[in-house]
């Protein structure tokens, strides 16, 4: 047992094992030092010594030093605090991956209650760490470990942003944006005064360099901070946002949405008065993200979508009825009889012109029938008191092709006779 534990401890990746990855940290630290030095040495101190509005200068110095101190604290904690990983087998054996039926491996679904599963219905696991993955957990190939509620890997802090250091990173962006804006807007007067030709070159260069650098960093950091505010309000991480962007759907939907206030508490902690200070982290271990208010919000949203679909459901199109095909007698060219006729009424009128009636006289010799056909009158026998039906008309006033064909046949019979 001890050998197994020692092997597991030996297999854990060593933090800060690659010294060259400290170069981005050294670069960021140099930027912080340069901006602090320029602002204090070429703006605050000279104005304080000349007595130009000492009250405003004192306020600027106090606010700037407080923000810079909080910035440095958050930056150090972002580097040193581990974002959190899946518990080892000694701490919680339920996360240990076992090659067996994965659906049966979930010992207590009511406690774990994972929201994320594979497409096959199996429980998510990490093939590198040999552990089951909690919700919102991803494996970082740079850190070589699974990170709880992983947001992204940041090379500027040589660490991943995850559950336990997300608040420090969020406040780091906030303090950096505030510091840059303080430098840009309060040091503008000193930069304008430095345009005097009598100003020493070093002073003019440092003020212009500091103002330009602070303006550029302020724009970049402010945009990045705004993006993370959006992610916090939508209860999403950067990885989850990128996954939705890849699928091109669901930007405004998250399975972990707890409402506006609940989403802020999930990042900045439960105590509202300590939101803007690097203390009072969110409660929990980063393994479960299901709560009652999240379920309620999700159910309400689902009900809202169902009602919206019900109201927007289009009415089914009414099928168009095709006109009934006319019942045409065999080659006579007459129009169909009226709807009130029965089969007995029209049985005598459905004979072909080549048929010979019982009287022995040929139909071709029936002048009255030929004259009626030429005149376009129905040759069907009508009951007493019934009026003859008119020939069927096509749209635009033309006779139907059946009537024209019958008329041509009768004319041909007349000519042959």
Image (cartoon, helix red, strand yellow):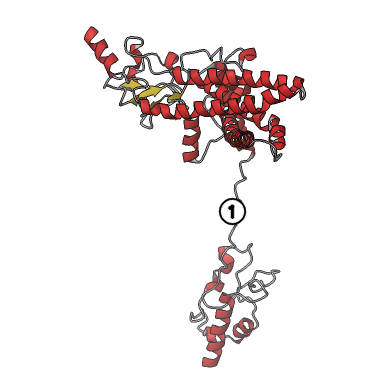
Q: Residue 70 appears at what percent x and percent y?
A: 58, 18
Q: Which of the pair 236/199 is nearer the observer? A: 199
The answer to whether any part of residue 112 appears in the image is yes
Q: Which of the pair 31/324 is nearer the observer? A: 31
Q: Which of the pair 266/104 is nearer the observer? A: 266
Q: Residue 306 appears at what percent x and percent y?
A: 59, 33
Residue at left offset 58%, top offset 63%: 324
Residue at left offset 57%, top offset 77%: 333
As displayed, is residue 260 above or below residue 345? above
Residue at left offset 51%, top offset 28%: 30
Examine the image and state in which quarter residue 8 appears. Answer: top left
Secondary structure type for disc 1: loop
Examine the image and state in which quarter residue 334 appears. Answer: bottom right
Q: How many marks?
A: 1
Q: Residue 62 appears at what percent x and percent y?
A: 67, 18
The answer to whether any part of residue 299 appears in the image is no
- Residue tagged by mark 1? 319
> Callout 1: 10 Å neighbours few (<14), some, many (20+)?
few
Relative horizontal placement of residue 178, taking residue 242 as reference (left or right): right
Query: The N terminus is located in which quarter?
Result: top left
As displayed, is residue 280 above or below residue 401? above
As displayed, is residue 387 above or below residue 147? below
Q: Residue 408 appears at what percent x and percent y?
A: 56, 84
């Amino acid at each position: 047992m001890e050998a197994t534990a020692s092997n597991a401890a030996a297999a854990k990746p060593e933090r800060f094992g690659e010294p060259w990855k400290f170069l981005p940290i050294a670069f960021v630290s140099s930027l912080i030092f340069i901006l602090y030095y320029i602002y204090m040495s070429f703006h605050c101190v000279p104005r304080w010594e000349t007595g130009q509005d000492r009250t405003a200068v004192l306020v600027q110095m106090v606010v700037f030093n407080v923000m810079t101190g909080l910035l440095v604290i958050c930056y150090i904690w972002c580097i040193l605090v581990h974002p959190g990983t899946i518990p080892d087998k000694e701490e919680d054996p339920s996360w240990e991956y076992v090659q067996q039926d994965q659906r049966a491996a979930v010992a207590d679904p009511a406690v774990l209650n994972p929201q994320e599963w594979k497409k096959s219905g199996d429980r998510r696991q990490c093939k590198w760490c040999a552990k089951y993955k909690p919700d919102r957990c991803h494996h970082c190939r740079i850190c070589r470990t699974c990170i709880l509620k992983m947001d992204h890997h940041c090379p500027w802090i040589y660490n991943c942003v995850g559950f336990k250091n997300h608040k420090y990173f969020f406040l780091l962006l906030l303090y950096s944006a505030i510091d840059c804006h303080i430098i840009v807007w309060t040091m503008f007067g000193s930069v304008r005064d430095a345009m005097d030709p009598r100003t020493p070159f070093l002073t003019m260069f440092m003020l212009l360099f500091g103002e330009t650098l602070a303006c550029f960093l302020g724009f970049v950091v402010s945009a990045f901070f705004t993006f993370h505010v959006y992610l916090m309000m939508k209860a999403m991480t950067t990885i989850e946002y990128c996954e939705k962007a890849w699928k091109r759907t669901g930007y405004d939907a998250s399975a972990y949405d707890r409402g506006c206030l609940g989403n802020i508490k999930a990042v900045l902690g439960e105590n509202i008065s300590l939101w803007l200070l690097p203390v009072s982290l969110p409660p929990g271990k980063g393994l479960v993200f299901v709560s009652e208010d999240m379920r309620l919000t999700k159910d309400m949203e689902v009900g809202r979508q169902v009602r919206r679909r019900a109201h927007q459901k289009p009415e089914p199109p009414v099928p168009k009825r095709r006109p009934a095909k006319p019942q045409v007698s065999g080659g006579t060219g007459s129009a169909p009889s009226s709807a009130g006729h029965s089969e007995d009424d029209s049985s005598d009128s459905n004979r072909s012109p080549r048929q010979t009636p019982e009287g022995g006289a040929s139909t071709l010799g029936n002048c009255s029938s030929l004259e009626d056909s030429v005149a376009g009158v129905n040759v069907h026998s009508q009951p007493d008191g019934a009026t003859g039906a008119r020939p069927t008309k096509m749209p635009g006033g033309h006779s139907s092709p059946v009537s024209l064909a019958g008329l041509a046949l009768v004319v041909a019979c007349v000519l042959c006779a």
